[in-house]
Amino acid sequence: LYSPLGLAELCLAKTQWRLPKPTGLHRLPPDLRGRMLLGLKNRRLLHGENLSELARGISVDVLNLSDATNMSMEDCRVVAKLIVKAPSTLKVSNSPLLNDEGLEALLARAAPALEHLDCSGAQDKLSGRCLQAFAEELPRLSTLLLADCCHLEPEAIMTLAKGCASTLQHVDIGGC
């Protein structure tokens, strides 16, 4: 049976491509902002105040920051401070400004619960030093996607693989 969309679903559909001003985002409940973050199709909007207000106080299992082409290291730091619980999945693929410092901030928040990490397509700025630093602090990591991260240092991949050997089930380093 078909049931009409509720007000929240209508709002989410309207914000897939365009977000309200950050002051408007601030007034929305955290669960709705978390759903907006997951459903956003125009990922270029994920930076600065927009990203801060979307992340403030949210509790999500999947933190999807993929294709956030304007997301800076500072944005990563802010998001890590603002989310309520550590996500089990962190997706930061195809985020060209992602570097070790930004990923380190996100890993510092997510590491204890992290099961799935996708950094694919971080082509220029990610060397993997932060992955080395967290190699022993990812007790649940089972999936690691690093495809097309062409500046990853081999030592970083080796150290992480050794540190997570008991839990890792799937690793993609194609194009590295």
Image: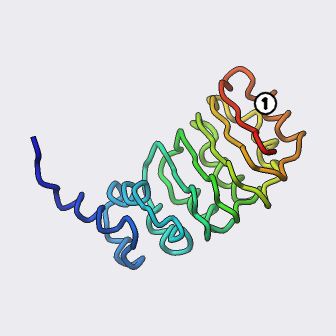
Query: Quick check: 40 left or right of 175?
Result: left
- Seen at 23% across and 59% down, the residue is 8
Q: Secondary structure at mark 1?
A: helix
Report the residue at 84% width, 53% height from top. Answer: 151
Q: Nearer the viewer, residue 39 or 73?
A: 39
Q: Residue 138: x percent and y percent?
A: 68, 34
Residue 68 occupies quadrant? bottom right
Along the line of sight, which residue is nearer the eye, 148 or 21?
Answer: 148
Give the image location of residue 69, x and y in percent.
Answer: 61, 67
Q: Residue at x 63, y 41 (%)?
A: 117
In the foreground, 70 or 77: 70
**Farthest residue in the top direction?**
166
In the image, residue 20 above or below residue 135: below
Q: Quadrant of residue 166?
A: top right
Q: Position of residue 137 (x, y in %)?
A: 71, 35
| Mark 1 residue type | Ala
Image position of 56 with respect to 3: above or below: below
Give the percent coordinates (x, y) of residue 93: 63, 52
Q: How is the image coloured?
A: rainbow
Quadrant of image for the C terminus: top right
- Screen quadrant of the N terminus: top left
Residue occupying the point 29% across, 68% down: 14
Would you name the residue on which mark 1 appears?
161
Label 1 Cα neighbours within 10 Å, binned few <14 / some 14-19 / many ≥20: some
